[in-house]
Image (cartoon, grey):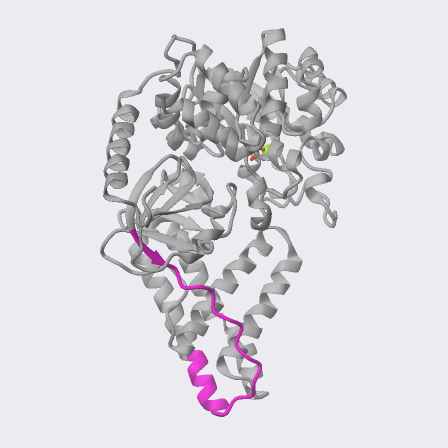
């Protein structure tokens, strides 16, 4: 490092290496003061209503420019700015002496709390209301709207975190990389970056120091932002980025290590549309079909017929290939109104996943029946697994039910430390296991996977998580049964090599990550992967584990 360079760290998403100028997203507006208006109601109402209608027009215009899904998101936000009930509420508050900005703030906040109380999908829309309110208030005050800065030249976007309205409109030719000071590896921003293949570093608290125009090198693989990189550093990074691009493009076909050892590279899908993306990315099949994504908006359990049709649409795209279907994983971050209990104080520790399904065995039976029917109607090799298994007894019960309903391959997810430690016994009943590293990490370090304030703990490189995975790998080896990983860890190319060294036999990830992982694992033999795994296992924390493996990986 040269004397002017400064290294800032966070959690890297992807492997990209990008050099660019920083553009900061304006911070959220402060809460408008509760002082009484000095302008009078007529002038305040004029300020508020023109800002509301200009915001609606602006959102619609941006939607029309962006098209597709972004248009739907932005049109829905425009409707909020146009809402006549909200305008009436704003007027009432102004008549009682409020300023335009305070009236807008309170009216939107009141509406948001009603949505929050409704829970589920409605509660998620409450955040969007806050975003619209901020845009309106910025117009009233004549300050820059919070949102992605406009530019015609590429830049590295630095923000606290991104709202859905911002991410929907990101222009990937202009925004070359993302750095956020908040948010964790499973935040909305990280998921978007991963899906789009955009290099990102999230939860980088020290990136607060970055200002517009700073030149940075974003190294997502290392989770580092180098401020004021030297010319030599930039040259090396660009050469490295180019050699990775060449490696990625030349790595095709099934997952294979340098010694020919095969590791199936599969895709995570949630709908028939994402299954198409998996086929295009040359996935060898599906390692995780998240069925709950199909029914997030349903308020009653879908019928066997509806489900059969949905599953068939995915299975048909993988003739002769493996498709691992996960039964509904409801609860915590993915509530399904017809399956989850409201009002649990700790839903992540409550009746979620298989626990909710056992409590509604009719829904579980219907789903397994639909999967079996859809499997019979297609040529896919269908495997079925249960989420959130915590004991051998749950495994036994689930596998028995699958057998009764005609499912040939029945397995379980390992997402809870207890099941990792008992994997040997679990595999006496299950035909296979698949490790969900997102939840396994959350439960190992007791840190909510959605909470930015504890994001630094949410790192699957943590040797404690790796040791649990090793237990599962050993059990797989002893029984000769398949051990997959389908959490986000599988999409980290360096970690993928370590996971293979721990005994993992297949890796499943979002389709965009497949090329990098395929290229990376082809550089190592199985013996080398085991050696790297040993180094990572003996580290004292995630950073050291990653460093220990990556020093060896780059040799
Ligand atoms: C996981 O927990 O790692 C997993 C794959 O399941 P989900 O992210 O859907 O909870
Ligand atoms: Mg999970």
Q: Is residue 34 magenta?
A: yes
Name the foreground residue: 52 vs 301.
Answer: 52
Q: State which region is magenta.
A: 21-49
Name the foreground residue: 70 vs 361.
Answer: 70
Q: Is residue 553 visible?
A: yes
Residue at (38%, 8%) from the top-left corner? 259
Where does residue 459 sit, x and y in percent of width and height?
55, 36
Where does residue 100 sit, x and y in percent of width and height?
49, 81
Q: Is residue 433 above or below residue 170?
A: above
In which quarter of the view is residue 526 placed? top left
Q: Is residue 129 above or below residue 458?
A: below
Q: Is residue 313 visible?
A: no
Q: Is residue 488 magenta?
A: no
Name the foreground residue: 67 vs 135.
Answer: 135
Residue at (49%, 70%) from the top-left corner? 83
Which quarter of the rendering shows the C terminus?
top left
Tell me: 366 left or right of 267: right
Tell me: 396 left or right of 451: right
Which quarter of the rendering shows the N terminus?
top left
Q: How many marks?
A: 0
Residue at (71%, 35%) from the top-left corner? 356
Residue at (73%, 44%) from the top-left corner? 341
Quadrant of the image where one finds ligand 1: top right
In which quarter of the view is residue 355 placed? top right
Where does residue 233 sit, x and y in percent of width and height?
28, 39
Where does residue 453 sit, x and y in percent of width and height?
58, 50
């Amino acid at each position: 490092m040269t004397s002017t360079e400064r290294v800032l760290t966070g959690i890297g998403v992807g492997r990209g290496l990008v050099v660019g100028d920083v553009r900061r997203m304006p911070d959220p507006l402060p809460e408008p003061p509760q002082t009484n208006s000095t302008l009078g109601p007529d002038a305040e109402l004029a300020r508020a209503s023109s800002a509301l209608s200009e915001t609606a027009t602006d959102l619609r215009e941006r939607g029309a420019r962006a098209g597709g899904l972004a248009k739907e998101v932005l049109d829905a936000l425009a409707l909020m700015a146009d809402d006549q009930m909200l305008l009436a509420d704003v007027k009432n508050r102004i008549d009682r002496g409020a300023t335009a900005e305070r009236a807008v703030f309170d009216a939107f906040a009141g509406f948001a709390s009603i949505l929050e109380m409704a829970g589920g999908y409605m509660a998620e829309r409450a955040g969007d209301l806050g975003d619209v309110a901020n845009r309106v208030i910025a117009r009233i005050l004549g300050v820059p709207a919070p949102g992605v800065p406009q530019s015609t030249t590429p830049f590295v976007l630095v923000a606290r975190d991104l709202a859905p309205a911002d991410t929907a409109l990101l222009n990937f030719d202009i925004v070359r990389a993302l750095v956020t000071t908040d948010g964790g590896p499973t935040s909305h921003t990280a998921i978007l970056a991963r899906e789009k293949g955009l290099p990102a570093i999230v939860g980088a608290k020290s990136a607060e120091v970055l200002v517009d125009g700073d030149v940075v090198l974003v190294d997502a693989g290392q989770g580092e932002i180098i401020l004021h990189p030297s010319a030599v550093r930039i040259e090396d990074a660009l050469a490295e980025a180019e050699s990775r691009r060449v490696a990625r493009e030349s790595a095709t076909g099934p997952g294979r290590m340098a010694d020919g050892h095969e590791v199936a590279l599969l895709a995570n899908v949630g709908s028939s549309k994402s299954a198409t993306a998996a086929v295009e990315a040359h996935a060898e099949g599906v390692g995780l079909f998240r069925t709950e994504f199909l029914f997030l908006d349903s308020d009653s359990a879908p019928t066997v017929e509806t489900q059969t049709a949905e599953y068939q649409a995915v299975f048909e795209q993988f003739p002769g290939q493996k498709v691992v279907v996960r039964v509904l994983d409801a609860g915590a971050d993915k509530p399904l109104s017809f399956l989850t209990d409201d009002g649990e104080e700790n839903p992540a520790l409550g009746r979620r996943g298989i626990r909710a399904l056992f409590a509604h065995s009719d829904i579980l039976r219907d789903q397994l029946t639909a999967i079996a029917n859809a499997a019979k109607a297609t040529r896919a090799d269908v495997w079925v697994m249960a989420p959130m298994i915590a004991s051998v007894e749950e495994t036994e019960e689930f596998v028995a039910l699958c057998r009764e309903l005609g499912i040939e391959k029945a397995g379980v997810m390992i997402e809870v430390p207890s099941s990792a430690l008992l994997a040997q016994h679990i595999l006496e009943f299950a035909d296979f296991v698949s490790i969900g590293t997102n939840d396994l990490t959350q439960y190992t370090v007791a840190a909510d996977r959605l909470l930015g304030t504890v994001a630094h703990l949410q790192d699957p490189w943590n040797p404690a998580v790796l040791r649990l995975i090793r237990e599962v790998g050993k059990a797989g080896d002893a029984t000769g049964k398949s051990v997959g990983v389908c959490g986000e860890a599988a999409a980290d190319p360096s970690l993928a090599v370590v996971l293979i060294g721990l005994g993992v036999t297949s890796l499943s990830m979002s389709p965009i990550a497949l090329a990098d992982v395929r290229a990376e694992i082809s550089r190592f033999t199985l013996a080398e992967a085991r050696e790297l795994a040993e180094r990572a296992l003996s580290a004292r924390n995630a950073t050291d584990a990653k460093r220990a493996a990556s020093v060896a990986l780059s040799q």
